[in-house]
Amino acid sequence: MRRIMNIFLVAVICLATAGVGTARTGETIVIKGSTTVLPVAQGAAEAYMKLHPDINISISGGGSGNGIKALVDKSTDIATSSRFVKDKEIEMSTAKGVYPVPHRVAIDAIVPIVHSENPVGDLTIEQLSLIYQGKIRNWKEVGGQDLQIVVVSRDTSSGTYEVWEEKVLHKAKVFPRAQLQASNGAVIQAVSKNRYAIGYIGFGYLNKTVKALTVGGVEASVETALSGVYPVARPLFMFTNGWPTGTVSSFINFIVSREGQEIVTKEGFIPLF
Amino acid sequence: MKRKIKETIIKNIFLFIALVSIVILALIVIFLFIEGIPVFKVVSIKDFIFGIEWYPTYDPPSFGIWSLIVGSFIVTLCASVIAIPLGVLSAVYIAEIAPPLIKEVFKPVVELLAGLPSVVLGFFGMAVMAPWLQATFDIPTGLNIVNASMLLALMAVPTIASISEDALYSVPQEFKEASYALGATRFETIARVIVPAALSGISTAVILGMARAIGETMVVLMVAGGAAAIPESIFDSVRPMPASIAAEMGEAPFRSDHYHALFATGIILFGLTLSFNLIADYVSHKFKEVGSATL
């Protein structure tokens, strides 16, 4: 037991010193917020730090709400968010003298997904809405097999859910028997292993383990989301306190530049231009 | 004289250190109540606890956590059904039956189980157990009460086993000797003398194990399915309280009603684990083994 403890300690010390070794000196930008925007922020930060080796960017997820909370507390320079700032949050921040300024950095399309062996390939917005309200309970009602539908949704407080609620459910309630998962990854995991299931995820998280449905005959793609034909799409934001200056402004300019938008594409989101 | 001063200083330092942790704990509890109580301005305590609709982000929102409470209880109960026999019987085996060599291996392995990160267990539940359960029982989803309970049981076993084992060890040697002297077999001695004598310790172990299960977050967040509805079978998904708090806190606007409601859920959870601990404490004192004379 003691030996194991020793090995463990040595490992911890090694890790700790390694961390100290790679720490950069110079200016630091802190980014917090949405897990949806996380891959974009990460990709952009890596590329930006390569260009400006004296600047250190630290990124953490935790959700859009947490990001804006951190912006209000002034514990972050940039808050990433998959939704626009709420009225209540604006009240909170102006009370503290913080003025959140939105910067659109990418567009995210939300895609309904099913198990790869599910024969259903297309659902209309109405059908999706009825499924999520628990009014359609069996796949055969939408042209599939005679199987119960297991509805997988995101937590009602996630940004992804909010878009789904707005664009698909039109503010109707998701029925309580829906499974609520805490992340895009968890939804994919749940749907890919379950032929009864339907879920929805950000376009960037789509992979071969699940089958993406078309919505009302429109496939989610860069073109359809940009042109606005694909009905379930939303912009992604980075919020700063006031109009950004200095390094923060240079970083945001980098993201909306052609080079930054290439990273957006590479991470599976839809670029602004 | 000098020595006395030194004594006093040392005594006070220890007192201070002991106080620090108590004060921090008290502050956390106070914070929990300050952040949780405001929700009762928008919803009555009765509607909060017994309301079955949990729609915290709708307009108007409904803050009823009854289905979350039921979810927590049902996974804890099912986990106990699995964990109690496993934990107690392994304690009996380790303490009374196992030869020294096997004991040397078993004891640390069971304790090592306690060190398994819950997120690892949760991932195992999601990626391995869920598809297996679904295929085996032909049910719509593998993320359900059974799955969560099995993993929670795995987490409660080390607690139950190691505390029960201590209780079994502290049964006086004379009891065993007397039992053998009367011609009892080994099984009779264990079942009728040792286990009953250690019962208060074993009960404490069980209650602490259950407290561990009801407060566990990561596993239920990942494998309980997260449906905020009262389950109709043990293969339904549930949304235990800790899972709800963990999943939603990140997105709840700071100091909103939803935020306060999550803290209030935390108060309920705190009340539950506290009462579990108080019961455990009561049981262990009330039925304390005070020497050989009590049996």
Image (cartoon, coloured by chain):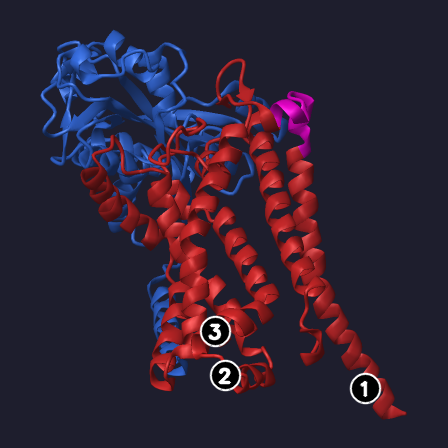
Chain colours: A blue, B red
Query: Mark 3 or 2, which is nearer the eye?
Result: 2
Q: Is residue B228 left or right of residue A255?
A: right
- Residue A213 to residue B135: above or below: above
Q: Secondary structure at mark 1?
A: helix
Query: Mark 2 or 1, which is nearer the eye?
Result: 2
Nearest the viewer among B174 and A179 is: B174
Residue A17: image location, x then y, percent: 37, 70
Nearest the viewer among B172 and B258 is: B172
- Residue B188 to residue B236: above or below: below
Disc 2 target residue: B183
Position of the N terminus of chain B, as image quadrant, is: bottom right
Q: 10 Å neighbourhood of mark 3: few (<14), some, or many (≥20)?
A: few
Residue B209: image location, x then y, percent: 51, 57
Q: 10 Å neighbourhood of mark 2: few (<14), some, or many (≥20)?
A: few
Q: In the rendered image, is residue B51 in sight? A: yes
Nearest the viewer among B37 and B199 is: B199
Q: Marks 2 and 1, how far apart in space?
A: 58 Å
Q: Marks 1 and 3, how far apart in space?
A: 56 Å
- In the rendering, which numbered label is found on residue A201? none
Type of amino acid under label 2: Gly
Q: Where does the magenta region start and end? A: B37-48
The residue that appears at 64% across and 44% down in the rendered structure is B271
Nearest the viewer among B264 and B278 is: B278
Disc 1 target residue: B6
Q: Secondary structure at mark 2?
A: loop
The residue that appears at 25% across and 26% down in the rendered structure is A199
- In the rendering, which numbered label is found on residue B188? 3
Q: Main secondary structure of the magenta part?
A: helix
